Amino acid sequence: MEILATFSILTSLLLLLSSFVDAQNGPRALFVFGDSLVDSGNNNFLATTARADSPPYGIDYPTHIATGRFSNGLNIPDIISETIGSEPTLPYLSPELTGQKLLVGANFASAGIGILNDTGAQFLNIIRIYGQLEYFQQYQQRVSALIGEERTRQLVNKALVLITLGGNDFVNNYYLVPFSIRSTQFTLPDYVDYLISQYTMILQRLYELGPRRVLVTGTGPLGCVPSEIAQRGRNGNCADELQKAASLFNPRLVQMINQLNNKIGSHVFVAANAFQMHMDFINNPRSYGFVTSKVACCGQGPYNGVGLCTVLSNLCPNRNLYAFWDAFHPTERANRLIVQQILRGNTNYMHPMNLSTIIELDSRV
């Protein structure tokens, strides 16, 4: 029976992977836009303070070298690439992204950015979201020179896209300092409305550039990251105001995605409920094999949530036992749990469908 079960699982995985592979063009391309949760190293090539290019970042990466990923190892785009049988996408600014490697896709994400251009201003030279979209246009021109315009259009149409925005618009803008410009300009509900209106235009522009399958992650539980527990939480609890912000933003994001899809007449945009994905292991860390979901593996101060993760920081010996790597970002193991839900989660996690369903539907076309 065990042999049959194992064979069944292997067969399912092979079908999953084969449906993501075009016989002519190889694995489906992946394009990534967003912030530090998905940045694979673009900021290494920029004069910015938002970077993760020194130890102990990358301690569990295959090369054990800091790559610019805000993780001890792989991040969410890496694990999605692994799932679909593709190479990890290279940062768009990497000099290695040339020739055939362009056909794998590209990562345009830049740590520190948000939906709004003024988000992350303290980090100086980062790639704002419209800058990322301009690079995507440039990418398509480069690929057209390689394989022609028609094949480039097909590659982009059939690609999978991941976009992760919004968290920094609260943490590194609205709540960055008391009486920030945005918090004096907007009440929290009005600010959420403004963010959604701006995000709508970003997603519309992305659609105009050709992708037809776009995973849009909502914000995680912003008040439950070690940094916010340390600075704003009471008695080790999540910070209420940041949690309220996330609880207002995420349902509005799903509503906006539904409206866009209805307007287009197709399920182009798919909402990933990152809030609930995180809260599962934040509320019950031991059920997921973690010893803590409050204390970061790397950091200093209360909950290791103060300041940066550096060689002088406290460092846990076993990253697999921690939900958070640093003051803001999940460990590789937590990222793997998140991707499992992206791949197979029910409608509480993925709306209107999960990645496995997308793969199955697209394999029929």
Image (cartoon, rainbow, N blue to C red):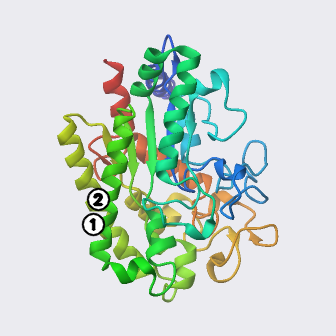
Residue type, numbered disc 2 = Ser
Residue 1 at x, y percent in the picture:
46, 26
Q: Is residue 182 left or right of residue 286?
A: left
Which residue is outermost to the top? Answer: 24
Residue 89 at x, y percent in the picture:
60, 36
Residue 203 at x, y percent in the picture:
35, 46
Residue 278 at x, y percent in the picture:
45, 61
Of residue 60 and residue 266, the one placed in the foreground of this image is 266
* Numbered tag placed on residue 277 in the rendering: none
Where on the picture, by quarter, is residue 36? bottom right
Q: Is residue 168 above or below residue 16?
A: below
The residue located at (27%, 73%) in the rendering is 190
* Numbered tag placed on residue 193 in the rendering: 1
Of residue 128 and residue 238, the one placed in the foreground of this image is 128
The residue located at (49%, 22%) in the rendering is 14
Q: Is residue 180 above or below residue 16?
A: below
Where on the picture, by quarter, is residue 310? bottom right
The span from disc 2 to disc 1 (Cα, nearest Å) is: 6 Å
Task: Count residues near mark 1 (Cα–Cα under 10 Å), then give few for <14, some for 14-19, many for 20+.
Answer: some
Regarding mark 1 in the picture, which secondary structure is present there? helix
Regarding mark 2 in the picture, which secondary structure is present there? helix
The residue located at (57%, 53%) in the rendering is 127
Where on the picture, by quarter, is residue 360? top left
The residue located at (75%, 63%) in the rendering is 317
Image quarter of the C terminus: top left
Is residue 283 visible in the rendered structure shown here?
Answer: no
Of residue 160 and residue 297, the one placed in the foreground of this image is 160
Q: Is residue 167 above or below residue 156?
A: below
- Residue that badge 2 annotates: 197
Q: Is residue 72 left or right of residue 344?
A: right
Is residue 181 visible in the rendered structure shown here?
Answer: yes
